[in-house]
Image (cartoon, grey):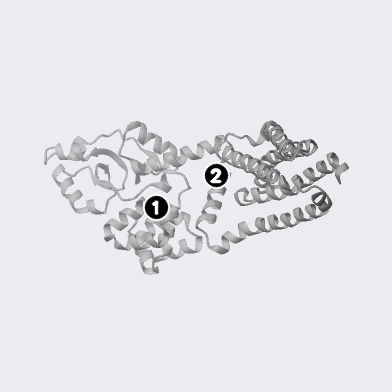
Amino acid sequence: MRELSSEEQAIVYRLLSKDKALLVFEQLDTQLQQKLLSSFTEDKVIEMISELAPDDRVRLLDELPAKVTKKLIASLSPEERKETALLMGYEEETAGRIMTTEYVRLKRSYTASEALENIRIHAQDKETIYTIYITDDSRKLEGVLSLRELVMASPEIKLEDIMHKKVIKVATDTDQEEVARTLQELDLLALPVVDKENRLVGIITIDDAMDILEEETTEDIFDKAGLADLNRKESDRSERLVNGSVLQIWKVRLPFLIITMLGGLMAGVVIESFEEALEAIAAVAIFIPVIMDMGGNAGTQSSTIFARGLILGHINTKKFLKHLGKETFVGLSMGVLVGVVTGIIASVWQGIPELGIAVGLALAITMTLATALGFFIPYALFKLGIDQAAGADPIITTIKDISGLLIYFVLVTQFLGYLL
């Protein structure tokens, strides 16, 4: 499903049987779930939302606009609405918010035979039946039992005689990461969630715990690098640029392309200003593409390295000047090397040593400037809260083209003035 286009996803999904469709839907991430819902009729959306497990339903509703969420909750049955409201009433990233209310709860006075019959009747509506919780009439948690232990027990034995009274449990306000770690470390299939009065209100299953651990681990990595907010912003921007409407994409990308166009016109003005030099020494024009392309390539390399380093936490924004200094030095060293080689080629090719010097110096300066801009411009856009993915390269290209041409023609005028 993830590999298909939006249209193909909708078609394939409609071909699935009802049960399989629900199973597939529950396994998709919330962004893909939202895309699928947008292709359904209103009745189909309501049907899907109502059939989801309570915890999966809340996870999806959390991602939808408030108006849509309110409308969908109102369309649920009274029981489903009550379950959903219960979970959404707890704080985000707590056990209460991610638990499910679909679990097996039995009374201690049941015999093993009665318990198995009860499970057979209600199993279809439960998220898991492998762990059975024993409560009193007021739902206070008294014990726990595995399905294996229940099946192996004598039919006449009462649950209170075989249940484990020491129950590992969590409170509704326990942090979700702590819950997930507990499930993982103790190899449990599910963990009961209780309120302040020790009443059983839900359970958290191992599959939900693994999803939480993946999310929390990723978040911790970005937090350590101070980039948690950046990760969320970049994720939203990427989603908008890849899957947004044409108008949304235009709003982000077109302004920067217009900047580049204006920059290109200004570069034309620079060339026009040195028209006499081009008419007097035709060879000068040969090296304009080289200088502009090498500067552009160096700048693009730097901006890409900055973006990747920032996202992965390799660049500490608090020590940006140190990173900028190193990148500028790298640009200078590469510029000098490329400038010397190109300058020698230009001298031998055109038979004008002074032209070779102008070309070599122009390349060295332009590449140094471009690498510095490649780091500085994305950083400045990041600090200003502007999308660096769409804006960095056009701005770098514009500044580099104008400055590179100016540097080149000034050097040509300086070293080849006697030929003009």
Question: Could you tell me if residue 7 is visible in this image?
Answer: yes
Q: Which of the pair 185/323 is nearer the observer?
A: 323
Q: Position of residue 74 (x, y in %)?
A: 42, 65
Per the image, the residue denoted by label 2 is 231
SS type, badge 1: loop
Q: Please, what is the three-letter code of the amino acid marked with disc 1?
A: Glu
Per the image, the residue denoted by label 1 is 3
Res 163 → quadrant: top left
Q: Is residue 71 above or below residue 189?
A: below
Q: Position of residue 166 (x, y in %)?
A: 30, 33
Label 1 neighbour load within 10 Å: few <14, some 14-19, many 20+? few
What residue appears at the point 69 percent right and 57 percent down from the top-left corner?
A: 261
Q: Decide if residue 147 is on the left or right side of residue 376.
A: left
SS type, badge 2: helix
Closer to us: mark 1 or mark 2?
1
Q: Is residue 79 above or below residue 129?
A: below
Dot 1 or dot 2: first in sequence order is: 1
Image quadrant containing the N terminus: bottom left
Res 194 → quadrant: top left
What residue appears at the point 48 percent right and 39 percent down from the top-left corner?
A: 218
Q: Which of the pair 231/144 is nearer the observer?
A: 231
